[in-house]
Image (spheres, rainbow, N blue to C red):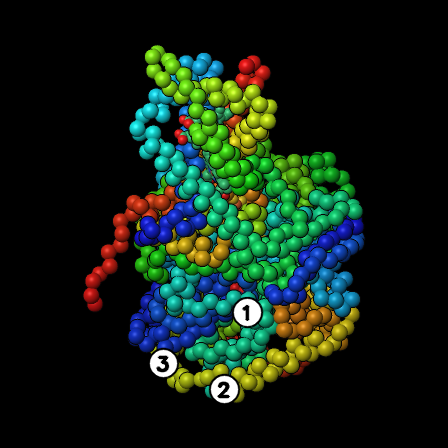
Amino acid sequence: MKLNLQVWRQAGPDATGRLVDYTARDIDPDMSFLEMLDVVNEDLIKKGEDPIAFDSDCREGICGTCGCMVNGIPHGPDRGATVCQLHMRRFKDGDTIVIEPWRARAFPVIKDLVVDRSALDRIIQAGGYTSVNVGAAPDANAIPVPKVDAEEAFEYAACIGCGACVAACKNASAVLFTSAKLSHLHLLPQGQVELSQRAVRMVEQMDAEGFGSCSNEGECEAVCPKGIRIEGIARMNRQFVQATFVARPERTAGGV
Amino acid sequence: MTLDAKIPSGPIEGKWDRHKFESKLVNPANRRRFTVLVVGTGLAGASAASALGELGYNVVAFCIHDSPRRAHSIAAQGGINASKNYRNDGDSVYRLFYDTVKGGDYRAREANVYRLAQVSSDIIDHCVAQGVPFAREYGGLLDNRSFGGAQVSRTFYARGQTGQQLLIGAYQSMMRQVDAGTVTLVPQREMLDLVVVDGAARGIVTRNLVTGEIERWAGHAVLLCTGGYGTAYYLSTNALNCNVTAAWRCHKRGALFANPCFTQIHPTCIPVSGDHQSKLTLMSESLRNDGRVWVPKKPGDARKPQEIPEAERDYYLERRYPSFGNLVPRDVASRAAKAVCDDGRGVGTTGLAVYLDFADAIHRLGEETIRNRYGNLFDMYKRITDEDPYKVPMRIYPAVHYTMGGLWVDYNLMSTIPGLHVLGEANFSDHGANRLGASALMQGLADGYFVIPYTLAHYLAGAALPPVSTDHAAFGEAVAGQQARIDRLLKVKGDQTARELHRALGHVLWDNVGMARNEAGLRKALAAIPGLRDEFWARISVPGDATNMNKNLEYAGRVADYLEFSELLALDALERRESCGGHFREEYQTPDNEALRDDVHFAHVAAWEFAGVGRPPVRHVEPLTFEYAKPSQRSYK
Amino acid sequence: MRSRVSFPFSTIGTKILIAITGLAMFLFLIVHMAANLLLFVGPDVYNGYSHKLISNPLIYVAEAGLVLLFVVHVFNAVTNWAKNRGARPVGYTKKAWAGHTSRKTVASSTMIYTGVVIFVFTVLHLVTFKYGPWYETTHDGQTMRDLYTLVVEVFRQPAYVVGYTVVMALVFLHLRHGVSSAFQSLGWNHPRYNRLILGFGYLFAVLIGAGFALPPIWIYFTK
Ligand SMILES: Cc1cc2nc3c(=O)[nH]c(=O)nc-3n(C[C@H](O)[C@H](O)[C@H](O)COP(=O)(O)OP(=O)(O)OC[C@H]3O[C@@H](n4cnc5c(N)ncnc54)[C@H](O)[C@@H]3O)c2cc1C
Ligand code: HEM
Ligand code: HEM
Ligand code: SF4
Ligand code: F3S
Ligand code: FES
């Protein structure tokens, strides 16, 4: 197959970028999308030109490193798949493919298709955990967890932190990502303890990073490679309201 | 050099407890004065960073990725072992210990393995408290499955994504410490060198992968948690960024490298489909619980699988190993697949594949049950191959998967350089010559959560560690060396890409240091590798410069290290004149083609000392003694 | 815990205010639309109902409430829209609908535009009717404002009919996304009831749009 690519090239964070045309030749339908880009890059390297910078690691849809817009859809047209799992048999000979990086204020471009997603780490840092020290845990079977709850928690825990939800959302909102973590922990007894605090702090961090709000368009759910559902966003909103208006305020111990 | 493993004396059951008691402690108020550099944030690194952060040390954690959550541990599918005996099926610390030593074909250190089995239960407790959503039964208690041919059900799992869930648990705990200010996170950094001052590891040199800057970091100890070197073979189930670079540079600074030839080839991976392929995808071993492995009886049989009648199929695992059948350990299953393909009976366009057939299981249990058990994996297979495994058998072939070898460490996980501790897949530790399924996750977390907090304290409390600043001459020397190397890479401006040379190296290794090795092949590899290395330095093309993100420059640097390291890999394989676990030397086999161990001459760890690139390294030996798990011929007949 | 003062300025708090005010106005519209349907019954009933409403002193409270809802809704909707645009300073050259389970529709993508039109419309609408010409009529011995005549007068003019019908189409669009969206914003999402919620939102958007559009058209062609 032969394909026409239009790829966003941007030399650095402050450089101005533009779409550049490339032709991908001798593409095998069994190749993955990123292998197709590898082929293009091999060519560029041989010509002594700077290859297209894009991120990837596991190439099997689990690490969340890869990600770019393929013809206007994050991770491309396949449902429930990352761009590293997208295969070229999805395309026809002679197709034109536009490839752009994730776009969001909170995801500045580092180079070409690589963006800085550390904002997502900082959201987790703001409470996306249970406060348990090594050695302090009770026996694993001390607290039974209904199977349905554990399974449901897993659904949300499956988020790979790729940022496609942000890329898809017209508001560049990170609510799907944030709510996935809140739901994962909320649905388990171990996570209930710090629920209110966690909801408030993570949402505050999400806002501070400059992500938008949610207009309930569900584009995020549709592109999420792990099928995280916007039901989690609704749950997060409930948690946030209850943390603000219902939860008991923390007492601070007076004096030292 | 004598290798002192510092194994505590006394009966095996009490060694670790006694050792913990006898280890020195660091006063809580003093802990924050100690800076610990943790390189890598996989299961081993993230667990260590969080555990040490909780104790109050000043931890700095580095990783290559843009987020610590992306470490290669995330890809582990099957599960994690623990001797909980929740199933009442006869499991115990002792049995887990025994199985692991036996599975490793008696090439692991007994005391380490026993400790691993001891802390395995605590790992599960801690992970559940972190919110890891392990599979549960309807009663709300944890589910277990049997894995990798174990006769007890001791594997805890979270669908097919156990590694992901465990890593996210560890990552979150680490981020909690980042929040608390005890851990400083430094992502997008590649460790390029270890800085040794007065004989102790006192710092590292990294490259900022975004700005290209070469940076210096000083500390009181370095924990190397940088994973395995499976990508030396180019194609493997490992993630693309896996590398030997950090470990190799430490090796060059004096850390011994142990058993590099112990590599694991996993039997159930999706076969190679063409030259363009960048990596191989593992199909979880659990598939062998219901799938039957077969090839046609007739060589060169080009019929479709459905058209081959039952009588003309060879279910070779069931035939050769009637009692374990399709569930024999990985090394055995892999070699058997290679044998039938060498026979000309391989299937698929390349002839390098065997069938894994679910027709019987679907017939017996119904498609729905199979879908529930393996739906994800079947989808993954279909996505990659465009074939529907509910209708046609899967094609599978072995692929490089895990490396048991790594930097040599003593019982305290310290390498031969004081202060340099090595955790997780990066050390050679507990798996001997073959790792059993679901035990790498266990080891990474055991090292990080439960071992290093004690052994590192002992080191820090006992060593004299005068302040060292990053202005020290040793830093200057290391930075200059790395800068020169990068400049050299950029200067060649040749016509070969790092990928081409890596692929070439991969072919050499796979063909000669792969599933079955022999002296002639190993010598061939040893002759070919230096040639490739010279070609690399003469012809490599690395466009761009070093002052911003340059992924190709990073990659070229790693390939260059593989071109040095691979020689050691082949040499170790040559010098180990026996077959054991994943290391199969064709010269040493039983009449029915099983691995033939030589306990008289090779019941030891081979630990190599660096002598310069292209110069023969020095082979040191740590003898292994087996007081509890007495070596016997593994038999899965 | 989070201070309740800053709640409205968080992304979630903002959206919750938009949803609550939106839903309240949605309820008003149902009542208003139902009242408008009294036009079909006849002048007496319609005027009688209006009179009862206007003459009730509580109407001032209700109106103040409505204004407040409106202002809060508009203020938050506009600032929220502006912030959201700021969250993606550089846009895509190519952006496509994701399909699958996406709830993105023409309606959801044009909320701000349909909203602005509704805003302008509402002002004009009040000028036309509430502050429009004052006709009087007597019914059961009571003198009251003859809104019926005014309405008929207005909708005899084709421009008004066309204008109103177009705006009602936009009201439909606003509510077609708005109603179910407000449920989601308020945390009402449950796999068992989601189809019901989406269906409810759609149905009521249609009912309100059609219910409002009907009287003007009917008046134009029959009166
Ligand atoms: C497909 C697959 C499935 C598996 N399934 C199982 C299973 O079911 N059960 C099981 O027990 N085991 C399994 N394993 C093995 C297991 O996942 C790994 O052995 C284990 O996770 C390794 O963890 P680690 O922390 O040592 O290293 P890794 O997770 O590889 O982490 C390495 C870290 O080091 C960093 N790093 C690397 N090089 C550098 C450098 N030069 N400078 C700075 N940072 C660096 C990386 O960024 C990363 O953070 C599987 C492995 C594979 C490939
Ligand atoms: C009768 C008047 C109105 C009604 C009944 C109404 C109703 C609603 C409802 C129910 C929502 C959904 C809230 C949510 O998603 O949480 C909504 C959203 C919205 N409204 Fe209105 N609205 C009205 C007028 C206006 C006006 C005058 C404007 C602006 C000028 C406006 C702008 C918006 C915008 C921009 C949104 C989308 C907010 C978002 O999700 O991003 N609306 N409206
Ligand atoms: C064909 C459709 C409509 C008709 C015939 C109609 C008719 C009227 C009339 C006659 C009044 C005056 C009532 C009074 O002064 O007491 C009125 C008031 C009002 N209308 Fe409408 N209306 C229509 C649609 C709408 C729509 C779509 C909206 C909102 C988006 C709306 C919002 C209002 C408001 C806010 C008032 C003022 C209520 C008050 O102050 O008590 N109307 N309408
Ligand atoms: S919610 Fe989905 S799309 Fe968003 S980061 Fe997680 S996996 Fe990616
Ligand atoms: S696409 Fe955006 S609007 Fe909300 S539902 Fe998803 S975050
Ligand atoms: S590279 Fe890991 S998800 Fe795509």
Residue B364: x and y in percent read 56, 33
Q: Residues within 10 Å of mark 3 (few under 14, many from 20)?
A: few
Q: Residue C53 occupies which quadrant of the picture? A: top left
The residue beneath circle 3 is B462
Residues at circles 2 and 3 in contact by the CB criterion of under 8 Å: no
Subunit under mark 2 = B
Residue B472's label in the rendered image is 2
Q: Earlier in the sequence, mark 1 or mark 2?
A: 1
User: Can residue B150 be seen in this snapshot?
Assistant: no
Mark 2 vs mark 3: tell me if same chain.
yes
Q: In this orientation, which residue lies closer to the viewer: B254 or C19?
A: C19
Crowd class of label 2 (few under 14; some 14 to 19; many from 20; radius 10 Å): few
- The residue depicted at 34 percent of the width and 74 percent of the height is B31
Q: Residue at x 46, y 32 (%)?
A: C126
Precedes in sequence: disc 1 or disc 3? 1
Q: Which residue is mark 1?
A: B189
CB of mark 1 near ligand 1 (< 8 Å): yes
Tell which tag, 1 or 3, sits nearer the viewer.
1
Question: In what element is the residue under mark 3?
Answer: helix
- For the residues labelled 1 and 3, the Cα–Cα distance comes to 30 Å
**Depth check, front residue: C68 or B390:** C68
Alpha carbon separation for disc pair 2 and 3: 23 Å
Residue A133 in view of the camera? yes
SS class of the residue under badge 1? Answer: strand
On screen, residue A147 versus residue A255, left or right, reads right
Residue at disc 2, secondary structure:
loop
Between the residue at mark 1 and the residue at mark 2, the CA separation in whole angstroms equals: 21 Å
Amino acid at circle 2? His
| Residue B522 percent location from the top left of the image | 69, 69
Q: Position of residue C162 (x, y in %)?
A: 59, 26
